[in-house]
Image (cartoon, grey):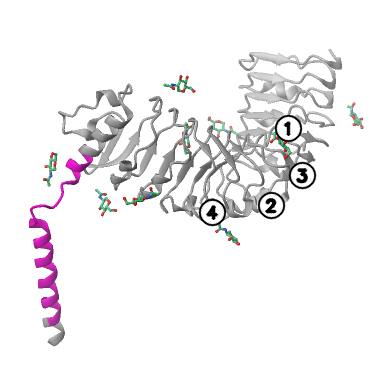
Amino acid sequence: MAKRRYVSFFLFFVISFSLLHKSCPQSTNQSNDEHQILLELKKHWGSSPLIGRWNSDSAAHCNWGGIACTNGVVTAISLPHQTFIKPLPPSICLLENLTHLDLSYNNFSTSFPTLLYNCSSLKYLDISNNAFAGQLLDDINSLSVMLEHLNVSSNRFTGRIPPSIGRLPRLKSLIIDNNQFCGRYPAVDISNLSELETLTLAVNPFVPAPLPVEFGRLTRLAYLWLSDMNITGEIPESLSSLGELNLLDFSMNKLQGKIPTWIWRHKKLQYLYLYGNKFTGVIEPKFSALNLLEIDLSSNQLTGTIPDGFGKLTNLTILFLYNNKLNGSIPPSIGLLPKLADIRLFNNMLSGSLPPELGKHSPLGNLEVSNNNKLR
Ligand SMILES: *[C@@H]1O[C@H](CO)[C@@H](O)[C@H](O)[C@H]1NC(C)=O
Ligand SMILES: *[C@@H]1O[C@H](CO)[C@@H](O)[C@H](O)[C@H]1NC(C)=O
Ligand SMILES: *[C@@H]1O[C@H](CO)[C@@H](O)[C@H](O)[C@H]1NC(C)=O
Ligand SMILES: *[C@@H]1O[C@H](CO)[C@@H](O)[C@H](O)[C@H]1NC(C)=O
Ligand SMILES: *[C@@H]1O[C@H](CO)[C@@H](O)[C@H](O)[C@H]1NC(C)=O
Ligand SMILES: *[C@@H]1O[C@H](CO)[C@@H](O)[C@H](O)[C@H]1NC(C)=O
Ligand SMILES: *[C@@H]1O[C@H](CO)[C@@H](O)[C@H](O)[C@H]1NC(C)=O
Ligand SMILES: *[C@@H]1O[C@H](CO)[C@@H](O)[C@H](O)[C@H]1NC(C)=O
Ligand SMILES: *[C@@H]1O[C@H](CO)[C@@H](O)[C@H](O)[C@H]1NC(C)=O
């Protein structure tokens, strides 16, 4: 009895409190506020193609170009290609439900906009293809803990990638290619990001170092782009655990040793780029990676013959094996591939005759086989 009375007393309190709160006349209208914030944003950035059409007379800012709302509340701003120059204004984080911010392909040139640390709902941040410069700071993990996609590709960021990047636990994409990041990248910390599906570190002047064994923990990776970043040594066995890979690009590095046989067993693999390395040995003749669309192993030191097994890759469109030391003849099975569009085998030691069926079964647009000593 005493307990029940206590409960009803408590309920009375809660209800009257919430009524009081609702009827409170100066309670703010989030929609009106957001309208004002967006107009401020327009004033700040000036009349870009899209923002120029934002009309202060129209209250329906949720219909403005580049704006998306959920239940009348602004959740997304997508303003790529607007040639914005002026730095991001702090007011942007007053849009407290902002989850998606795309400012790619503008002309920002400040340091990383740390004011975005205040956007606590942010899940998607794309500031790629600008001229942002300077370092990412150690407190980069002050970005929203909700963050799933971080794209800072194609800017002018320098310095080391801070280890705290590994403390954004929900990251699905980490896209930091094409910057001036240097030193060592924090491989152990990155490999703590167990949700990661896309990882690009390509085209950054890192110091020479082997592929991190720890990346084998990132078993959800579908897209791994690690070109042109001074990678040495062999491809570690641990990466055989990356069974979800769709794209594997280790091109333009200093990798050596054999191309591991497990690569040809990744059933989801469609794009395999290992060109411009120092791989040796023969190409594994047993394939089960039958979904491959593009293979580029050019400019290595591969020996032995072109495996007949390539003829099983019925979706293959591109086969580049030029600048190697391959010998033997071109397997006739390749001539039967129905989608093959471009095949480049020049600068090898191939012999025999070109398969007569080549080009009869597919829209072959390009065939380059020059500089093979005994090919007829
Ligand atoms: C808030 O303002 C918007 C736009 O002026 C209006 O449509 C909406 O009805 C207002 N909401 C409340 C709860 O007053
Ligand atoms: C907006 O965010 C606030 C604070 O996180 C939350 O209480 C509110 O429910 C959100 N509104 C909508 C419409 O999602
Ligand atoms: C913005 O950057 C693009 C590409 O870098 C450049 O062509 C353009 O002139 C720049 N615009 C302004 C207004 O600075
Ligand atoms: C976040 O907002 C608070 C209050 O508006 C401000 O004092 C602080 O400097 C902001 N933080 C950043 C990193 O801009
Ligand atoms: C940046 O990365 C995100 C997340 O993966 C992706 O959706 C987006 O297309 C990328 N931006 C550009 C300009 O490629
Ligand atoms: C990543 O995990 C390792 C151990 O598993 C730990 O030592 C390290 O501090 C973690 N890094 C981050 C950024 O959480
Ligand atoms: C490779 O490392 C060297 C030495 O640290 C550096 O000078 C060079 O820019 C790096 N090259 C690439 C392609 O990253
Ligand atoms: C080839 O592509 C088709 C359609 O794009 C797909 O259904 C098929 O699973 C792919 N793989 C193989 C081995 O044919
Ligand atoms: C190809 O070259 C290897 C040595 O690298 C040799 O053992 C083999 O007999 C050659 N095969 C053909 C078909 O010429």
Q: Position of residue 137 (x, y in %)?
A: 52, 48
**Image depth: mark 4 or mark 3 in front:** 4
The secondary structure type at the circle numbered 2 is: helix
Please state the quadrant of the image where ligand 7 appears: top right
Q: Which residue is mark 3?
A: 234
Sequence-wise, which precedes: disc 1 or disc 4? 4
Whole-number angstrom distance, CA of label 4 to CA of label 3: 28 Å
Q: Which residue is mark 1?
A: 309
Taking the spot 79% from the left edge, 36% from the top edge, the residue there is: 279
Q: Which residue is mark 2?
A: 213
Q: Is any atom of residue 221 visible in this view?
A: yes
Whole-number angstrom distance, CA of label 2 to CA of label 4: 19 Å
**Image depth: mark 2 or mark 1 in front:** 2
Whole-number angstrom distance, CA of label 1 to CA of label 3: 24 Å
Sequence-wise, which precedes: disc 2 or disc 1? 2
Please give the range of residues in magenta: 6-35
Sequence-wise, which precedes: disc 2 or disc 3? 2
Query: CB of residue at label 4: within 8 Å of ligand 6?
Result: yes
**Image depth: mark 2 or mark 4 in front:** 4
Looking at the rendered structure, the kind of residue marked 4 is Ser
